[in-house]
Amino acid sequence: MLGLMMGKPLLISSILQHGAEVYGEQEIVSRSVEGDLHRYSYSKAHQRAKRLANVLKKFGIERGDRMATLAWNGYRHFEIYYGVSGFGAVCHTINPRLHPSQIAYILNHAEDKYLFVDLTFMPLIEAVHEHLEALQGVVVLTDRAHMPESKIPGLHCYEDLLEASSEQFHWPEFDENSASSLCYTSGTTGNPKGVLYSHRSTLLHSMAIALPQAMNLSEKSVVLPVVPMFHVNAWGIPYATPFTGTKLVNPGPKLDGNSLWDLMEAEGVTASAGVPTIWLDLLRAMREQGRAPEKLKFVVIGGSAVPKSMVKAFEQGFGVEVRQGWGMTETSPVGTINVIKDSHLDLSDDERHDVQIKQGRKLFGVDLKIVDDDDAPLPHDGRTQGELKIRGPWVCSSYFKQDNADEHSDRAWKDGWFSTGDVATIDAEGYMQITDRVKDMIKSGGEWISSIDLENAATGHPEVAMAAVIGVSHEKWDERPLLLIVAKEGTSPDMASVRDYLSAQVAKWWLPDDIILVESLPLGATGKILKNRLREEYKDHLMIKD
């Protein structure tokens, strides 16, 4: 027997329509590429998104056609999110930090019909434009006064297109399982893989991250997503803000600590989200200012493990809570967020921080488990570690156009679960902690060493800004850990002092066989350390030692 309820589909267009009707005067503030600070309301954004939908109609776009973007976090990019998906096409965000050859591959693989591009990225598109097979046109996200000269023929001006279009548009209704947006993984081996989200999955994911035990969004909130809109849809924030009435502040291309501090202070930002490398520079700016932005309550940090030293720096230095999150492109991306329980407030600071550096508890709708090498479930005791698997309504079931699958995808889906490639523990309270990537675990003399735990320990040293641990070949032990560190500005850490510091933090046999001071560590398109590059560069480093 079925319930007797209306079957209104869960569509992305309904999110912005709700925001316009209920929170119509709430602000969206954006620092533009042209340099000004743009302000308008959800109501105005909704009107312009409908104008864009009419532009797509004039272009001859059909449902399911892919429309690409290369753009920063800004109001025009926000309008594309809704205008494209609301029309029934697929909003395909592209990460400009990828190699040009990868960008060309992605555009061709997705068969994008049009590309919307910020002025910043015009040189990038000019370099690859002649290799783009399906592209019918390029729209520059600016006004007529700032249109660039370009060798690309027939450029369209975004503001001209909207000006010439009507804001009278009725959002169509269609199956909520229809594709809404497309993101490609920034995999370090092989070609990037496409993850195709649906309207239903996106809306459910957005509702989940807005809950109190996640980002706690409401009409009283002011959120600034530092995580880019070209990286897994800015973790869903552009979708979660309109239906909660949250003021949205977009940083545009200025992501340095000083610019972020100024914008947060001026706009009364209460929450922000981004990767650890961004927060290192914001912490520097906060130290220079002597305080955090006045209204900032918490930051959500994801993308890589958050060291305890960063949690302490935000909390003890500035009274700002750190909420760590975990997810993947394949999980839309948020699967867990760490919000401490009231019972944790009775713990010592150090004990509470031990909880906060975990990746957190699953969001409603998501299931997690850890398994051994034979795929048998392991206990959730906080000690036993195994490969992490996930399932849920916003977890992908396969990659877009499977022809670009790699060896991992062959085993990625089994019995309805997605194998994440992460090694994790889950405790009795449901807090999950990533202990390593399967490929980054170091097996020394038959025993496992966690590179993440070693890195977190190293970054606790007062003169260490960043750290990376890799396993390198060893004649006796098969693999041993090698530690590479970047010094904090104005310091010159002594390697012996770093080793002594680590000796008090980890088991003796975990201590790295060598420590190397480097000027910088190679970062990928999403801010993660490229360990595969480090492993190649240092693969023989210990083999020449006694």
Image (cartoon, rainbow, N blue to C red):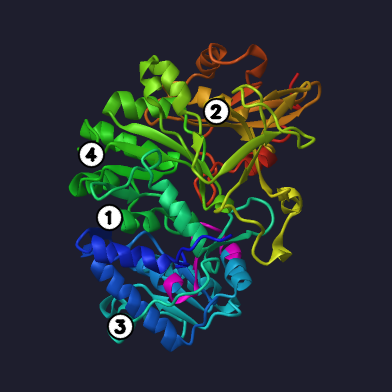
Give the quadrant of the C terminus: top right
Q: Which mark, residue 455?
A: 2
Tag in front: 4 or 3: 3
- Closest to the observer: 82 or 38? 82
Q: Secondary structure at mark 3?
A: loop
- The answer to whether residue 98 is magenta is yes
Q: Amino acid at mark 4?
A: Pro
Q: Which mark, residue 168?
A: 3
Quick one: label 3, few (<14), some, or many (20+) residues within 10 Å? Answer: few
Tag in front: 1 or 2: 1
C-alpha distance separating marks 1 and 2: 39 Å
Highlighted magenta segment, given as a residue range: 85-102
Between disc 1 and disc 2, whose residue precedes? 1
Q: Amino acid at mark 3?
A: Gln
Q: Amino acid at mark 1?
A: Gly
Quick one: label 4, few (<14), some, or many (20+) residues within 10 Å? Answer: many
Q: Are marks 4 and 1 in contact (CB under 8 Å)?
A: no
Between disc 3 and disc 2, whose residue precedes? 3
Say which residue appears at 56% left-offset and 12% top-offset.
503
- The answer to whether residue 265 is magenta is no
C-alpha distance separating marks 3 and 1: 23 Å
Q: Are marks 3 and 2 in contact (CB under 8 Å)?
A: no
Tag in front: 2 or 4: 4
The residue carrying mark 1 is: 245
The residue carrying mark 4 is: 293
Q: Are marks 2 and 4 in contact (CB under 8 Å)?
A: no
- Vertical placement of 382 versus 296: above or below? above
Q: Secondary structure at mark 1?
A: loop
Q: Amino acid at mark 2?
A: Glu
Write down the quadrant of residue 234 in the picture: bottom left
C-alpha distance separating marks 4 and 1: 22 Å
Say which residue appears at 52% left-offset and 22% top-offset.
457
